[in-house]
Amino acid sequence: MTRGNGLRHIPSRLQFRRSYSSGALDPPPFIHPRRVVVTGIGMVTPLGCGVKTTWKRLIEGECGVRVITIDDLKMNGFDREVQLSAFDHLTSKVAGTVPCGTNPGEFHDDLWLNSKEHRSVSRFIGYALCATDEALKDSNWIPSTMEEKERTGVSIGAGIGSITDIMDASKMICEKKLRRISPYFIPRILINMASGHVSMTYGFQGPNHAAVTACATGAHSIGDAARMIQFGDVDVMVAGGTESSIDALSIAGFCRLRALTTKYNTAPQEASRPFDCDRDGFVNWSMQKNVVLRYMLSFVVMEAQVMHIILLNHI
């Protein structure tokens, strides 16, 4: 509609309602969204590798926060004097680190990566592959046909990726060793390579999504994946968030922000207290959690456990 002064008039909501009620406009068709359920979970956390290990240690009251050491700074390419100086200048010396090793419940790269993948895959991507393996087995979902793979997607994001690789490459530039930078440097730091490697490993042909929204990344990834299922874009999604941010540059950056706790360097078990009046900052963590989401009424769900039902209006 156009007024006498030539300006276009935009009808109000009330006028639209009156138009609907009088039959002048047809209301948009209502689409019933599909219900989304969680059928599998996989974890790599400071309490251990795997859901059972993490849950057992959690209910036993164990804490994944510990005092960090110089080795946690991942500065192997730097002189020892530089490492000691960096460590001494950090105001926060506690973090939630993933236990690594060959013992049960510990994360070990060799279990998930071959010799070639060790060069092209950084730690946060390795966490994603490990958690995905557990989540898919927990969900009893390993698609074999092309149709199943086309209806399976991935939504895994991260906050900052592999800062360690950026730090190492920067050192080589300063030392005029540009040609020694790995050809895998870019693929190792890109956030979307976590979801990309998961899709390539299992042959998934569905949507491939990577949110980057700091600490909200995991929640956004799961929410986005659930909506893809809800509106029929896909039937199954592997979704979650991954992070490997225990290194010198990440910790130093958060320290300069005055975002990390500094009062509990000698009492790491007391450091994480987000709702306490004595809190003075958060604890830096490395971890990964993945879930397998499915369309509830698809035939494959009938063969799987339903752990949770997701209400999309709450995400």
Image (tube, grey):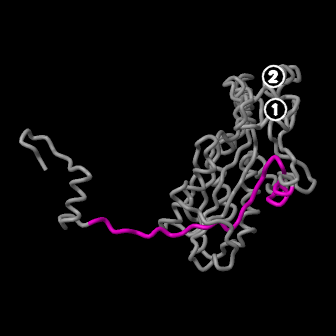
Find the distance from the CA under tag 1 to the CA under tag 2: 9 Å
Res 6 visible? yes
Q: How far from the left and from the top, in percent, is residue 252? A: 73, 26
Question: Mark 1 and 2 residues: CB-CB less than 8 Å, in contact?
Answer: yes
**For this view, does 122 lie left or right of residue 60?**
left
Q: Along the line of sight, which residue is nearer the eye, 241 or 18?
A: 18
- Residue closest to the eye, 2 or 211: 2
Q: Residues within 10 Å of mark 1 (few under 14, many from 20)?
A: many
Please state which of residues 114 and 42 is positioned toward the viewer in this rendering: 42
Which secondary structure, mark 2?
helix
Q: What residue is pinned by disc 1?
A: 73
Q: Residue at x 77, y 37 (%)?
A: 272
Q: Residues within 10 Å of mark 2 (few under 14, many from 20)?
A: some
Residue 263 x, y percent position in the rendering: 80, 26
- Confirm whether residue 108 shows in the render: no
Image point 56% across, 76% down: which residue? 297
Q: Which residues are magenta?
A: 27-56
- To which quarter of the image does residue 53 belong? bottom right
Q: Quadrant of the C terminus?
A: bottom right
The location of residue 55, given as percent across then percent down, is 82, 57
**Amino acid identity at mark 2:** Ala
| Image: 91 above or below 128 | above
- Image x and y of residue 131, in percent: 74, 57
Q: Is residue 168 above or below residue 143?
A: above
SS category of the residue bearing label 1: helix
Q: Which mark is residue 82?
A: none
Residue at position x 57%, y 71% from top? 295
Q: Is residue 48 left or right of residue 12?
A: right
The residue where tag 2 is placed is 86
| Amino acid type, label 1 | Leu
